C-alpha cells in the first residue's frame, strides 16, 4: 500500500509507479546536475581499485589513499607484481587492509593473465575477479564503460528506494531487481548517483529532512 499525492492510501499500479519514478528522477536530476561517482579515477583500472577499497570505507578516505597507490602501481601489471605487505602499508587506513591488499593483487594478476591487462567489460567476467561482487561490477560497468547493466545498491539507495515506495525488499539484489522494473535501463547508473547524493544531503537515515526534500510530494514516507 502506498500513499497517493492526496495523502490517501491505495494500491499503486506499475504504470503509476513508473510515472512517479520518472518524475522523481527528473526532479533529482535537476537538483543534482553534477551527480557522479565520488571515487576519483582516470581509467577503468583506477576505478576498479578504488571501488574494491571502498568496501566498509568512505569515499573520502579512499580518495586520500589512491594517489599514492596509483603512483606506485599505475597499472595492473605493476600491481600484480607488488608485495602484499607494501600494498597493505599504503591502504592501511581504509580498513580490512590485509584482505583488500590480497584482493587487489589477485584482481590485477587475473586481469593480466586472463584479460590481457584490460579490465573486462562484462558482469560475468568482473564478478569472477577477486574482491568484486555485483555492486562493484555495476559501479565499474556504469561509470568506466557507460554500460547500464544494473543499479548500484548501497545503504543510501536501499533506504531511499524503500522510503519512496519503489521496493519493500531489504536485500540489495532484490532492491536492484525492483528498481530495474520501475526505471528504464538508460537511467540505472545515474539513478544510483542521484539517490546517493540525495541520501547524503537530505534523506538521512535517522532524521530525514522531509521539509527540505524536493520530492516530498512524491514520497509515500514524507512527513510533510
Image (cartoon, grey):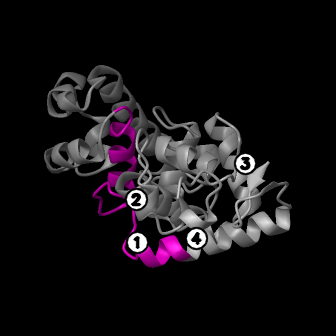
The mark nearer the N terminus, 1 or 4, is: 4
Residue 107 shown in magenta: no
Q: Quadrant of residue 22?
A: bottom right
| Side of 99 where 205 appears, left or right | right
**Around disc 3, counting alpha carbons within 10 Å, would you say few (fewer than 14), some (14 to 19), or many (20 or more)?**
some
For marks 2 and 3, give the CA distance: 21 Å
* Residue corresponding to mark 1: 32
SS category of the residue bearing label 4:
helix
Q: Tell me which residue sits at (49%, 58%) in the image.
A: 195
Instruction: Please tell me the numbered disc located at residue 104.
Output: none
Residue drawn at (80%, 68%) of the image: 16
Q: In the image shown, does 108 or 167 lie closer to the viewer?
A: 167
Residue drawn at x 54%, y 37% is: 133
Residue positioned 54% across, 63% down in the render: 216
- Residue 65 in percent (x, y) is at 18, 42
Q: CA distance from mark 1 to mark 3?
A: 24 Å
Q: Nearer the viewer, residue 82 or 149?
A: 149
Could you tell me which secondary element the residue under label 3 belongs to?
helix
Q: What residue range appears in magenta? A: 27-56
Residue 203 pos. (x, y %): 44, 52
The residue where tag 4 is placed is: 25
Q: CA distance from mark 4 to mark 2?
A: 12 Å
Q: How many marks?
A: 4
Residue 180 percent location from the top left of the image:
71, 57
Circle 2 sits on which residue? 197
Residue named by callout 3: 177
Is the residue under label 4 in contact with that under label 3 (CB below 8 Å)? no
Tell me if label 2 and label 1 are in contact, CB under 8 Å.
yes
Q: Is residue 75 left or right of residue 165?
A: left
| Disc 1 from disc 4: Cα separation | 10 Å
Amino acid at each position: 500500500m502506498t500513499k497517493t499525492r492526496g495523502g490517501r492510501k491505495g494500491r499503486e499500479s506499475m504504470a503509476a509507479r513508473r510515472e512517479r519514478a520518472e518524475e522523481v528522477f527528473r526532479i533529482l536530476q535537476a537538483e543534482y546536475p553534477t551527480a557522479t561517482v565520488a571515487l576519483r579515477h582516470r581509467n577503468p583500472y583506477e576505478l576498479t581499485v578504488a571501488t574494491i577499497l571502498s568496501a566498509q570505507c568512505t569515499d573520502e578516505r579512499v580518495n586520500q589513499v589512491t594517489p599514492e597507490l596509483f603512483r606506485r602501481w599505475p597499472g595492473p601489471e605493476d600491481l600484480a607484481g607488488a608485495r602484499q605487505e607494501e600494498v597493505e602499508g599504503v591502504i592501511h587506513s581504509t580498513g580490512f587492509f590485509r584482505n583488500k591488499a590480497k584482493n587487489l593483487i589477485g584482481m590485477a594478476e587475473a586481469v593480466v593473465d586472463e584479460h590481457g591487462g584490460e579490465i573486462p567489460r562484462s558482469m560475468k567476467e568482473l564478478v569472477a575477479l577477486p574482491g568484486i561482487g555485483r555492486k562493484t561490477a555495476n559501479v565499474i560497468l556504469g561509470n568506466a564503460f557507460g554500460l547500464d547493466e544494473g543499479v548500484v545498491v548501497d545503504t543510501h539507495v536501499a533506504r531511499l528506494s524503500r522510503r519512496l515506495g519503489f521496493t519493500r525488499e531489504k536485500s540489495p539484489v532484490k532492491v536492484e531487481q525492483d528498481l530495474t522494473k520501475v526505471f528504464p535501463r538508460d537511467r540505472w547508473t545515474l539513478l544510483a548517483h542521484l539517490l546517493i547524493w540525495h541520501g547524503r544531503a537530505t534523506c538521512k537515515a535517522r532524521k530525514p529532512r522531509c521539509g527540505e526534500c524536493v520530492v516530498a510530494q512524491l514520497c509515500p514516507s514524507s512527513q510533510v
